[in-house]
Image (cartoon, rainbow, N blue to C red):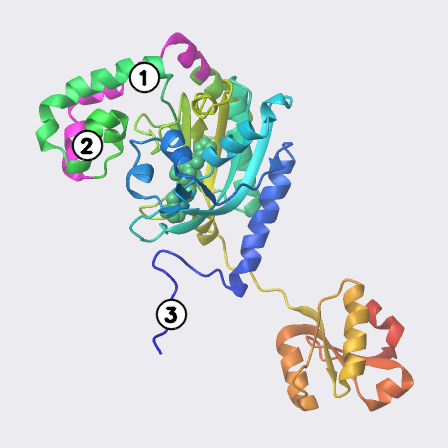
Amino acid sequence: MKQIKVLKGTKDILPQDVETWQFVEDCANKVFSSFGAKEIRTPIIEATELFARGVGNTTDIVNKEMYTFEKSDRSITLRPENTAGVVRSYIENGMSRLSAPVKLWYHGPMFRYERPQAGRQRQFHQVGVEMFGIDKPTADAEVILMAENFLKSVGLTDLSVEINSLGCPKCRLEYKEKLKNVIRPYLDKLCDDCQERFEKNPLRLLDCKVESCQAIYAKPEIQEVINSDFLCDDCKKHYVELKDYLNKLGIKYSENKLLVRGLDYYTRTVFEIKSNNLGAQNAVCGGGRYDGLVEQLGGEHTPAVGFAMGMERLISLLPERKQTISDGFIVSNDMTEAFKLAQELRSQGFNIEMDLANKKFTKQLEKASKSAKYALILGEDEISQNKVSVKNLETSQQQTVDRHECSKYLK
Ligand code: HAM
């Protein structure tokens, strides 16, 4: 019969890798909790409209990457990201009544129908933070600090933080018009994607990776607009203050005027954290401020800022972890006694395995030496005297001890 294989762009996370995932999730819990953030778990399926309205109709995500299906006349989508879902939950559960800032963190699978390549999957995982209720740049600075502390806690330091300000819808509109005017004469020379983005989302033009487009955007008159200072006074103040906080916090960053991000909801601050060791898909973390999104999804006006990190990308940068082995492996031909001792020790918090196939003693010992720190030998003599022979599988030293004292040796 034909073998069924895992779907393209998806991966099994195998037992030998799960410990690293658990380590990263534990670090996230510890670090984000240390900032007073609470974990939130929202559904993987949401109404398609949430993403159309939330992430934006002009984005690649909504236009071509969503897994959408109909069920009982409803259009449902597997979440391509989690900011929109967390905002929906924030509104639906009246979290605006809580005292600000409301800090939420999450981790879990996301789905985007993208062309799979190194660092890009169709089912991938994100760990992220969303903070609601503070419009000051202190919130942006703290969110970036949360990302940094977390990355440090998992052991990653060789990363660079890039920031930019996209301004508010008002000052950005003028900038978009200027950009379109200066690019318009080259419109027919741009790639198909850029031609489409020209009207829908001109800021994304700057993101294009096609060389001929990049050559056009490098022209002096276009660069002049890109490098012009288009921010209104309030947006400028916000950005200057944020940089000031980052400097004082000792967070190294560089400014990147071309950083625009691929989702529509951002206002003012956007940032990315990149690794030099990841190839083309080098963004480990992406985030920014989205002051209009809560209102856009039917809530009261609520400023917000957050980020999400790709867990696969992050984990690919970590050294391989040694798998932990069990504390003890019971070697015995008396299954009933072996079960009893295993349960006694498990109830005291030890990880205990035993032979279930009723193999010969020597085979059991062989298995023990591969999977545990100690072999706990229960032969006929030990059982009749209520003792256990404890063998250290690293040093091969062996001692026979009273059964109730066995746990002392495992510690
Ligand atoms: P994003 O930039 O679309 O932002 O995704 C954040 C991170 O998820 C990326 O930097 C990358 O590490 C990872 N990622 C994205 N797509 C894939 C993929 N196909 N395969 C593997 N990893 C991927 C967001 O999703 C926003 N919701 C972030 C945010 C939260 N902004 C404010 N709050």
Q: Please tell me which of labels 1 and 3 falls first in the chain.
A: 3
- Image location (x, y in percent) of residue 174: 27, 13
Which of the numbered marks, if any, corresponds to residue 172?
1
Secondary-structure class at tag 1: helix
Q: Secondary structure at mark 2?
A: helix
Q: Which mark is residue 196?
A: 2
Q: Earlier in the sequence, mark 3 or mark 2?
A: 3
Image quadrant, ligand 1: top left
Q: Are marks 1 and 3 in contact (CB under 8 Å)?
A: no
Judged by its main secondary structure, the magenta piece is: helix
Asked if the magenta segment contains residue 235, the reply would be yes
Relative to 230, does residue 315 appear above or below in the rendering?
below
Residue at image coords 41%, 43%: 76
Question: Where's residue 209, x and y in %?
Answer: 23, 39
Q: Quadrant of the N terminus?
A: bottom left
Q: Which residue has dot 3 on it?
A: 4
Horizontal arrangement in the rendering, residue 385 relative to residue 264 (left or right): right
Mark 3 crowdedness (10 Å alpha carbons): few <14, some 14-19, many ≥20? few
* Res. 274 in view: no
**Residue 411: image x %, image y %?**
79, 65
> Up-down: is 366 above or below 15?
below
Q: CA distance from mark 1 to mark 3?
A: 50 Å
Number of residues whose C-alpha sits closer than 10 Å to that of mark 2, classed few (under 14), some (14–19) or many (20 or more): some
**341 or 336: nearer the viewer:** 336
* Residue at the (45%, 33%) spot, across then down: 84
State the residue in front, 401 or 351.
Answer: 351
> What's the residue at 58%, 53% (across, down)?
22
> What is the CA distance from the residue labelled 1 to the residue labelled 2?
19 Å
Q: What's the residue type where badge 2 is placed?
A: Glu
The magenta region covers: 210-238
Amino acid at dot 1? Arg
| Left or right: 173, with 108 as reference point | left
